[in-house]
Amino acid sequence: MIDVYYAPTPNGIKIPIALEELGVPYRLIPVNLSANEQKRPEFLKINPNGRIPAIVDPDGPDGPDGEPVSVFESGAILQYLAEKFGGLLPKPARERIRAFEYLYFQIGGVGPMFGQAGWFMRHPEKMPAGIERYQAESRRLTAVLEARLQESPWLAGDEYSIADIAHFGWLRSAGYAGVKLEDFPAVKAWVERIAQRPAVKRALG
Ligand SMILES: N[C@@H](CCC(=O)N[C@@H](CS)C(=O)NCC(=O)O)C(=O)O
């Protein structure tokens, strides 16, 4: 049974969604971010970066009776799960490349920019220019997704993948970063389509 160190945040929900989609049993271990549990020494052994999500797979990558492995960084966890359990990543090389492009686009772009936009919107006294800069960047990144989803049902192409799962939590809460989904109709329809998936409903309870 895979242990998922979890809080119900845009990064946190990626992991139970992927595990539900793959049909893999898991146990959620809540991490109280307000109490800074993610900075405790025992958790830092699992994720030296002191953030959720992280997982511990008692069987490791080699399957039953293998060595346990811990994985941190949500993109690395999604890739680990997709490769170990054989799903959520297209097999054709060209679509697989697209899946990784959009996965890293989320990890390096959408996540940090939406996060900063949301933070500055809630702390305007710190730096008004921060709101303007990070909101503008969040909208620009959403426009990139809009263009992709105008031409393709899913971010990798014809198949739903870990690239979609990585973005879903951030885009369904786009208002947090000052992004109005009404301005991005293909992204809005894609968020609604993902929210209707039975695995996603189960993961979100
Ligand atoms: N790049 C990391 C980001 C993880 C992250 O920012 N997690 C947030 C919750 S969404 C967190 O643990 N925040 C608490 C903290 O920074 O102490 C990932 O994708 O896993």
Image (spheres, rainbow, N blue to C red):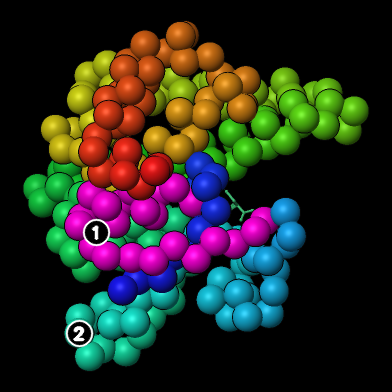
Q: Tags 2 and 1 in contact by the CB under 8 Å rule? A: no
Residue 156 showing in the rendered view: no
Front residue of this view, candidates 57 and 78:
57
> Which x, y percent locates residue 143?
44, 19
Front residue of this view, candidates 64 and 131:
64
Residue 192 showing in the rendered view: yes
Q: Mark 2 falls on what kind of element?
A: loop
Res 165 → quadrant: top left
Q: CA distance from mark 2 to mark 1?
A: 17 Å
> Which x, y percent locates residue 118?
67, 31
For the magenta stretch, what is the residue range?
12-33
> Which x, y percent locates residue 103?
37, 45
Q: Does the stretch in magenta take in 29?
A: yes
Q: Residues within 10 Å of mark 1 (few under 14, many from 20)?
A: some
Res 75 → quadrant: bottom left
Image quarter in which the C terminus is found: top left
Counting the numbered discs, the total is 2
Residue extending farthest left = 92
Residue drawn at x 90%, y 28% is 125
Residue drawn at x 72%, y 62% is 36
Q: Is residue 67 left or right of residue 70?
A: left
> Which x, y percent locates residue 124?
84, 26
Q: Is residue 39 left or right of residue 179?
A: right
Q: Which residue is label 2 attached to?
A: 64
Image quarter in which the N terminus is found: bottom left
Residue drawn at x 68%, y 79% is 41
Q: Which amino acid lies under the numbered mark 2 shown in the image of this protein?
A: Pro
Residue extending farthest front = 205
Residue drawn at x 21%, y 24% is 152
Cβ(mark 2) to ligand 1 < 8 Å? no
Front residue of this view, candidates 191 and 35:
35
Q: Which mark is residue 82?
A: 1
